[in-house]
Amino acid sequence: MDAAGVEAVFQKLKKAVIERALGAELGMRLASPEGGRGNHRNGRSSKTVLTDEGPLRIAVPRDRAGSFEPQLIPKHERRFAGFDDRIISMYARGMSVREIQGHLAEMYAVEVSPEFISAVTDAVMAEVGAWQARPLEPMYPVVFFDALRVKIREDGVVRNKAVYLALGVLPDGTQDIRSAGKH
């Protein structure tokens, strides 16, 4: 598998994470007093955003009142650069909700509530967990194993950890990547 194949797999995960985060943001909006009584989800609209790795087509959730203004990717905004670095920095540092709140204010110039951060984090973690737990295919003719050494904050101490990856190639040539966790 070449670098483009690995990037394609990560683009799919990035799309799922962005869409899940936007859905959690809308959920928080609808649950708030500003969300309006009787306002509900009303489908999705397509939007192409430019990431560091190129264009990414996402589905942005809508509300019936048309009052939902996403903070993660504002309306009419087309650039979403540095997404990977921001998400990795928040999770790898083991940041608290208040630290993430400060980080978002610094990077996005957006003020968000701790409840919003918790809702988005829970939604994103659910998406990552579902991606990691998806069932294996019955056969992989070719399998590559590798480990990536990363620095992770754990119990207030930064440690080097190995993130084990398995890349399987299916008979039709498509690739499937797995993370075996940190050790």
Image (cartoon, helix red, strand yellow):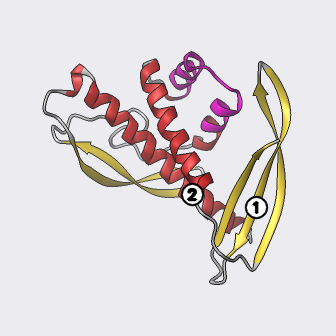
Q: Residues within 10 Å of mark 2 (few under 14, many from 20)?
A: some
Kind of residue at badge 1: Ala
The number of callouts visible is 2
Can residue 133 be seen? yes
In the displayed structure image, the side of residue 183 where residue 95 appears, left or right: left
- Quadrant where the N terminus is found in the figure: bottom right
Q: Write down the residue under mark 1.
A: 166
Q: CA distance from mark 1 to mark 2?
A: 17 Å
Q: In the rendered structure, does residue 106 fall within the stretch colored magenta?
A: yes
Q: Helix, strand or loop at disc 2?
A: helix
- Image location of residue 8, percent across then percent down: 60, 64
Can residue 111 be seen? no
- Compare residues 77 and 96 and report the one nearer the observer: 96
Q: Which residues are magenta?
A: 87-107
Which quadrant of the structure image shows residue 87?
Answer: top right
- Image location of residue 61, percent across then percent down: 31, 46
Q: Helix, strand or loop at disc 1?
A: strand
- Quadrant where the C terminus is found in the figure: top right
> What's the magenta bit mostly, secondary-structure-wise?
helix
- Compare residues 133 and 106 and report the one nearer the observer: 133
Which residue is at a point 70% across and 27% down the rendered structure image?
93
Q: Which residue is situated farthest in the bottom direction here?
A: 172
Of pointers 1 and 2, the one earlier in the residue sequence: 2
The answer to whether residue 129 is above or below residue 7 is above
Kind of residue at badge 2: Gln
Q: Write down the residue under mark 2.
A: 11
- Image location of residue 48, percent across then percent down: 41, 55
Nearer to us: label 1 or label 2: 1
The answer to whether residue 178 is above or below residue 138 is above
Q: Residues within 10 Å of mark 1 (few under 14, many from 20)?
A: some
The answer to whether residue 42 is above or below residue 26 is below
Q: In the rendered structure, does residue 160 fall within the stretch colored magenta?
A: no
